[in-house]
Image (cartoon, rainbow, N blue to C red):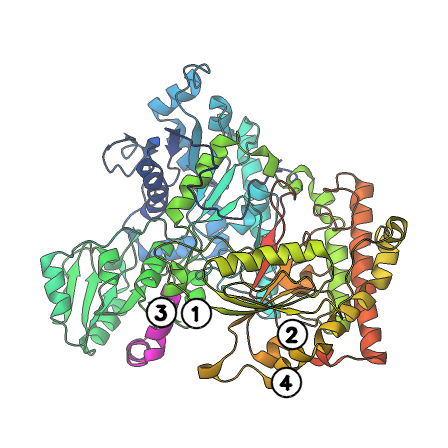
Amino acid sequence: MMVSGLYTSAVLTLVLLIAACRWVLPVENVRILAVQTVGAKSHWNFMRGVLRSLTDAGHNVTVFTPFPDGDRENYTEVDMSKEFPVKTNVNLKRAMEIYGRPVTYFYVLTDLDSMYCDAVYKNRQLDRLVHGGDGSDFEKKFDLIIMESRNLDCTSYLANALNLPIIFTMPSPMMTAAERSFTGHMSNPATVSHYLALQAVPKTFVQRFVNAALLAYSTLRTTYDGWIMNMTNPRRYQSSPKVNPSIIFLNTNHITEASRPVVPNVIEIGGIHLKPKNKLPDDILEFIEGAPNGVIYFTFGSTVKLTTLPIHIEKIFKQAFSNVSQRVLWKYESEMKDKPENVMIKKWFPQRDILLHPKVKLFISHGGLSGVYEAIDGGVPVLGFPLFYDQSRNIDNLVNSRMAIALDLMTVTEETLLNAISKIINSQNYSINAKIASERFRDRPITPQQSVVYWTEYVIRHKGAPHLKYQGLNLTCYQLNLLKYSTQNFITTTMMVSGLYTSAVLTLVLLIAACRWVLPVENVRILAVQTVGAKSHWNFMRGVLRSLTDVGHNVTVFTPFPDGDRENYTEVDMSKEFPVKTNLNLKQAMEIYGRPVTYFYMLTASDSKYCDTVYKNRQFDQLVHDGNGGNSERKFDLIIMETRNLDCTSYLANALNLPIIFTMPSPMKTFTERSLTGHVSNPATVSHYLALQAVPKTFIQRFVNAALLAYSTLRTTYDGWIMNMTNPRRYQSSPKVNPSIIFLNTNHITEASRPVVQ
């Protein structure tokens, strides 16, 4: 990365807000220039979904594309299909040889990128636009650029020529090899799979080792190839200063991608390409509805021709399909010899509408993301035959959701194929899990389309939003990593000694919950416990609880700051026994809490005092011992508590067998982040919450920040261990329960951009 100079900036906030708030300044008629930089139909489907969202909101789009759909209101196309190398109906075996092996894939990647970029800039109209500039301030043609990111940077040239902010689209999962150059953050290969990895999550040492080697190789290979090309056959677009994206629209969702830390400029819009259901053609509809035992749908997408299947593999599918009781829709690009009677073939099928039909029992797929989202949205189980690129990890994510089985295409037999088909169709578990995945996929605070519109307008409103750039973008490779690994190793060792292994949480941030297509949840019974006797902490908790009671949920809260009961809200007053901190002596408070050494010296004792007080409350103690009843007589559905360094929350969650949500009224406590989320922030970029500066900018600040993180982790772990050895509490012996959500009292204005788990 140092050789190529691909040091970059990160941008924006992770939190999705509702798109039409009355206090948000309106942005009307944004003039958008979009350029499709990859000649693959699935990539265009993602870009097209983004652009459709913007034109539907009244913005004007001009797009250079090799896949013209035709002009419409607010939408103008420049057809590049004649000069652009489009990849459709590729030979399957050839595609697997090139793109199915990381070594061969990365060998051709830079050449592939340069071919696409050359085709873009050789277009006469785009060339004229670049050389003519974007006009004066009074004659500007465009306000914003949207392009698909490439490993070879040919986007900065256009952004610099037109002096415009740029938004990236990324139709695959985050390209881990290029993540550093796009966002300033590099994912940990021990937890985050490379996008060409065979598994969704590296679970074994061998998988983690191979994943790390794959990340190292891909980064080195693409950097080296780009450098060689720049030395031997330089392009004009390579000499342009780097322009970092204001937003990256990422084609992911927590159903199809494992939880991982990302910087706030990465906005998930998985499923953006999904369209409303249309009526199926009569012949297809008749074929489906006339199937007494349902239908199987078989396709490997728009890139690969199924007619290029090896003859013996095609024969296996024919024989297997002839022996199933279902009818089969098979995307096949020519006439088929010896076609089974229960099979319909066509060069093209309306895949989205087929997968929404209730008679479809199984989707046999290669694991392309477009089809994966369509299967999940339709609640259809999948039999996956991943071929190349990100498809193995896509299918593995579905396998982890227990709605899919994965097989190898080149070693499949008729017996294994029939067994897999029979297992998925005849076992209700796969269908049930697919329906569960569908419900979770659709359950979002705002739609992907609304998210695209909001964040695009946000970039315009805030002039590219430079206030949200991640500090990692401003550091060189050695500055970023000098303290990172030593601190992470120290914390990992400390956690091993204490036995505090933890798992990562779902999404770190919860958003507003009222969209018409979200399944309603009524009268949730919430048990809340205030574990700190500080009024500012209670103010944060009170805001959370007020939000819940205002929408009709029922809250019972144990608190030392009673406000009085109200509708849906019952308080248990703990003010008499709880050590409340108000009206403290200023000098004494500064001496204790203003110095990290004295603060951490008393932190465990303070936590134990609060936790002891909570568990000594008679009503609370009775609740713990009585438990939460059976499913038909449950008293509560959920627990909300403020997190403490000393874990006294798991005991309650285990006793009542309930999920738990944490509130955190301060910024993320970096020394507890590992135990709460499974992620350790880099002390070279993320300040400790007791640090003197918001962002460590000098070597001294980074060093002190790393030392502070190491000391606080060691001190609190050691004090907790000593207390457990000398004066153990009952709540310390309970198995760890990780929070489902953490409500964090931060905002991108008051907290510097940083990676968080989502």
- Rounded to the nearest angstrom, the CA distance separating label 3 from label 1 is 8 Å
Where residue 638 sits, quadrant-wise, is: bottom right
Residue 545: x percent and y percent?
Answer: 56, 60
Secondary structure under tag 4 reads helix
> Can the viewer see residue 30?
yes
Which residue is labeled 4 in the image?
Answer: 625
What residue would you read off at disc 3? 434
Would you call the spot at circle 4 few (<14 residues within 10 Å), some (14-19), or many (20 or more)?
A: few
User: Where is residue 186 drawn, in percent x and y?
Assistant: 61, 50
Alpha carbon of mark 4 to alpha carbon of mark 1: how far? 35 Å
Question: Mark 2 packing: few (<14 Cα in 10 Å), some, or many (20+)?
Answer: many
Picture layout, residue 758 above or below residue 410: above
Q: Is residue 424 magenta?
A: yes
What stretch of residues is rendered in magenta? 413-438
User: What residue sits right under mark 2 in the picture?
Assistant: 650
Please tell me how crowded label 1 is: few (under 14), some (14-19), or many (20+) other residues with Cα within 10 Å: some
Label 2: element kind: helix
Determine which of the numbered discs, if any, sits on residue 401 in the image: 1
